[in-house]
Image (cartoon, rainbow, N blue to C red):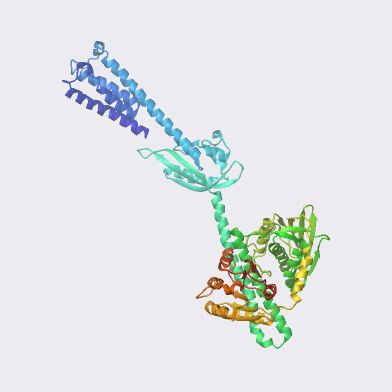
Amino acid sequence: MDRIQKLLGYVIAVVASLLVLVCRLALSDVLERQAELLPFVLAVTAAAWWGGLLPGLCATVLSVLLGIYFIIPPPNQLQIQALADGLNAGIFVIVGTTISLLCEALHASRRRETESQFRTLADSIPQLVWMARPDGERFWFNKRWYDYTGTTFERVKGFGWQALRDPEELPEICESWNRAVKAGNEWEQTIRLRRKDGEMRWNIVRAVPVKNARGEVECWFGTNTDIQDRIEIEHALKNADSCKDQFLATLAHELRNPLASISNAVQLWPAVRNDPDEVRHIWHIMERQVRQMSRLIDDLLDVSRITRGQITLLPQPVDAAFLINAAVETVQPLMTDLRQRLTVTLPDEPLFINGDVARLTQVFSNILNNSAKYTGQNGEISIHVSRDDDKVVFKFRDNGPGIPAHMLEKIFEMFCQVDDTLGRSCGGLGIGLTLVKRFVDLHGGTVVAHSEGVGKGSEFVVTLPMLHAPYQDRRSDHSEQTSEHSRPVPAHRVLIVDDDLETAEMLAKLLRSRRWDATALGDGFTALEWIRARRPDVVFLDIGMPGISGYEVARKLREDEDLEETFLVALTGYGQPDDLRLAREAGFNLHLTKPVRLSSLDDLLFKLPVGRMSIHSGAV
């Protein structure tokens, strides 16, 4: 580009000088004799402005020669001695030279400014920028290159950059680069570059040739872009997608298993309904499978809430022994079926924790359930609770198959399965231990897994901050509360409203078997008329009903002053925080998530308070 500009400068010097000569001759009668060479200053300025010093000097010399020959008398003669007659030509030469020097200085300043701007820009971008000569020898690198590679110009100039490449990849890189240099084509390749910490990271290298007017490569301009993080993200997304597919397949498997058991039990029922032992056995199977499905759904909902940051803890002082007993009670049916031996060692003194009872019970029951599933038939499980300074330590140990060393940390990740083969005998979605980790973290504690290897059992250790303030032992309170269930229940009038009338009628029959006066209805409009006519004590309302929703039914009931004391319970499959808020705003006293245990409804109806109470949530 500079060569073209210089050449054009010489052309302008000649053309401009001739044009000025023609104009000066045309105005010879007007201009005085002393101004013979003055107009030629325009030609010198134009040539110097465009081409710099040499074109400006060329215009100066040419202007002097043209002026002496055509303008300074006698005309049409090249009389150099005319310079002695006056200083006009000499002064013009000095002026022309000065103008040429000033223009050259201006061009140099602009080049320096452009180069400075380019270097500033090149140093500020995240890419590694470099320039190479036509033969591929690199002669300039930006600051980012040196910061990234930890090298100096002396080490990487020329072809020294090759030392930063993987030796195994270098021959292929050099061959590809040499082909591009020889052909003068753009070059792009994904390669690995050694960073200053020694890590080999993936980079995309791009280089474009800078060509002159004749199509010759004057230099190469190249960039390196680090794409290591992008590649890792892509791999993580692929792994996540694979985990998602595996999770959905596992979810379908885990839901079909209990459904199959329930379906088989229902089909078997007519054949064995007269055999009390078989009926009892089928009933236990169905209860256990429903509880398993409910547990899976609750875990999924908890994961969703944690992911969105919508988990709210309700901390209160609770004895560590009470939490363990509650967890054991939850998992005991599974351990009994597997004929497992459980040993529980509790401290002599109460150890209190300031925590959410429901969530901590879920933590320990998930760990215990995990141990029971993986330990298998006739296994041994132990629980040991102790104090370590200002912390309470819970240790769950089993003699099951153990955990491989590389999985000890990964097992707390979402959807992680130690055994993901088709033949694995233990169910689960791979989210139980994820919930354990999240809930323990929310309580300011830690959970770690230990195992000496495959076949040598495993141990989970949960550590939680201890509450030092003296509190009474809650275990006695709990036993007193549970004893109340043995007392006769009052005969409240209960209404169940659900568009799935079979579900409503089944629940009504269960309540009637417990001596409650229960009625089932299948739509909200009929329920409104029935409630206004019969005035029940408790109404269980489904939310998602056609025609009129449970929310609307509740609002209409609350508008009636005569029904203010009616206790409204939202019994629904919707259990998100927004659902609880909408239930509260509609006037419900309580929110329960399906499925609900009969014993829980017994407990609710037995303890039914007089008048309205604030909204709560529950899921059993």
Nearest the viewer among 432 and 536 is 536
- Give coordinates of residue 223: x percent, y percent: 48, 43
Q: Residue furthest left?
A: 29
- On the question of residue 57 being in view, the answer is yes
How many marks are shown on the rendered structure?
0
Name the spot of residue 256 as percent of width and height, x first: 61, 74
Which image quadrant for residue 614? bottom right
Q: Nearer the viewer, residue 579 or 218?
A: 579
Picture quarter containing residue 44? Answer: top left
- The location of residue 490, given as percent across then percent down, is 70, 78
- Horizontally, residue 293 falls left or right of residue 209, namely right
- x, y (%) of residue 421? 65, 67
Q: 47 or 80, which lies in front? A: 47
Query: Where is the N terminus found, in terms of image quarters?
Result: top left
Q: Residue furthest front?
A: 561
Q: Observer-nearest residue: 183 or 291? A: 291
Residue 55 sits in which quadrant?
A: top left
Q: Quadrant of the C terminus?
A: bottom right
- Answer whether residue 398 is visible to the viewer in this image: no
From the viewer's perspective, is residue 346 above or below residue 598? above
Q: Residue furthest right?
A: 348
| Position above or below: 602 against 65 | below
